[in-house]
Amino acid sequence: MNFVSYPDREFMMLELAGKIASQLSEALSMHGRASFSVPGGTTPGPIFDILSGVNLDWANVSVILNDERWVGEDNPRSNTRLLKERLLVNKAAAAMLVPLYAEAAEPESVLGALAEGVAPHLPLTVLLLGMGSDMHTASLFPGADRLAEAMAADAPLVMPMRAEAAGEPRITLTVPVLAGAMNIHILITGAEKRAAIEAAAHLPALEAPIRVVLDNATVHWAE
Ligand SMILES: O=C1O[C@H](COP(=O)(O)O)[C@@H](O)[C@H](O)[C@H]1O
C-alpha cells in the first residue's frame, strides 16, 4: 500500500482535498464529467467542508456515497444527511447526488432502482473511503451476512448488508465497483486505525475487508 503520513489532520485534509479536486478536474477536462464516491461516518466532515468551496465544474460531477445506513435523513446517523450538510453546499451544491437511500422499510425493496441510478456513473473517477478500527470499509463489515457475495467478481453494483457491528441495515457499493475506481484514497486518523490498516495488509479480506482495495489505494493518515 502507498501510505502517506501527515503532520496533522488539518494539513492532511487540505492536501487530500487538493489532490481529489485535481483528479476530478482532469476527468472533467478529458470527458466532460466525473464521478466521486465518498464515505459517511465521523472522519470526512472537514474534507467535505474544504471541497465544497473548491472551484470545479461541479454541475458535471456526480456524487455517490460508498454506503448508507438504512435510516431517514432526519436521523443524525444518515450519511446522506452528512453529505447534504457538509459537501453538497456552497460551490459543490451544483453537483448531482446519486441516491443510495429511498424511503422503504428494507433496502431490498428498492435495490434495483438504486443500482440503476449508480450504473451510468461507473467507473468511479475518484473513490474516497473511510475505515473503521474493525477494518470495515463502506458497509463491508467483517462477519457481515453477505460479505462473501459482495466480494465476488460478479457481485451486483449495490447490495444490502447486515452485521452486528453495523447497527441498522446497510446498503453498500460492492467490491467490483470499489476496486474498479480510477483513483482510490483511504482517509484515516489516529493510532488505532493506523495499526488496523497495517494489520489488514497481512489478513484475508473476509477478516479485513479494507484489504480489497489496499494494493491500489493511497492511504492518508494523521494522528
Ligand atoms: O459506518 C461507517 O463507518 C465508516 C468509518 O466511519 P468513521 O466514523 O470511523 O470515520 C465509514 O467509512 C462508512 O462510510 C460509514 O457508513
Image (tube, rainbow, N blue to C red):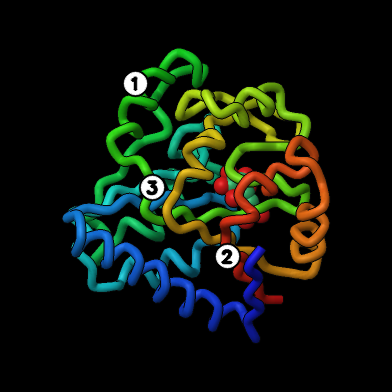
Q: Position of residue 158 (x, y in %)?
A: 48, 28
Q: On residue 113, which mark appears?
A: 1
Q: Badge 1, how many Cα within 10 Å: few under 14, some, many 20+?
A: few
Tell me the kind of residue under disc 3: Leu
Q: Marks 1/2: CA distance?
A: 32 Å
Q: Which residue is mark 3?
A: 124
Q: Return the disc, 3 or 1, that comes first in the chain's sequence.
A: 1
Classify mark 3: helix, strand or loop.
loop
Residue drawn at x 47%, y 79% as measured from the top left = 15
Tell me the kind of residue under disc 2: Thr
Q: Quadrant of the N terminus?
A: bottom right
Q: Position of residue 154 (x, y in %)?
A: 52, 24
Residue drawn at x 58%, y 43% as measured from the top left = 138
Question: Mark 3 touching mark 2, by CB under 8 A?
Answer: no
Q: Marks 3/2: CA distance?
A: 16 Å
Q: Badge 2, how many Cα within 10 Å: few under 14, some, many 20+?
A: some
Residue drawn at x 55%, y 78% as measured from the top left = 12
Q: On residue 218, which mark appears?
A: 2
Q: On residue 20, which mark appears?
A: none
Q: Position of residue 135 (x, y in %)?
A: 74, 49
- Left or right: where 20 falls relative to 199: left
* Label 3 CB-ligand 1 distance < 8 A: no
Mark whose residue sits in front, 1 or 2? 2
Classify mark 2: helix, strand or loop.
strand
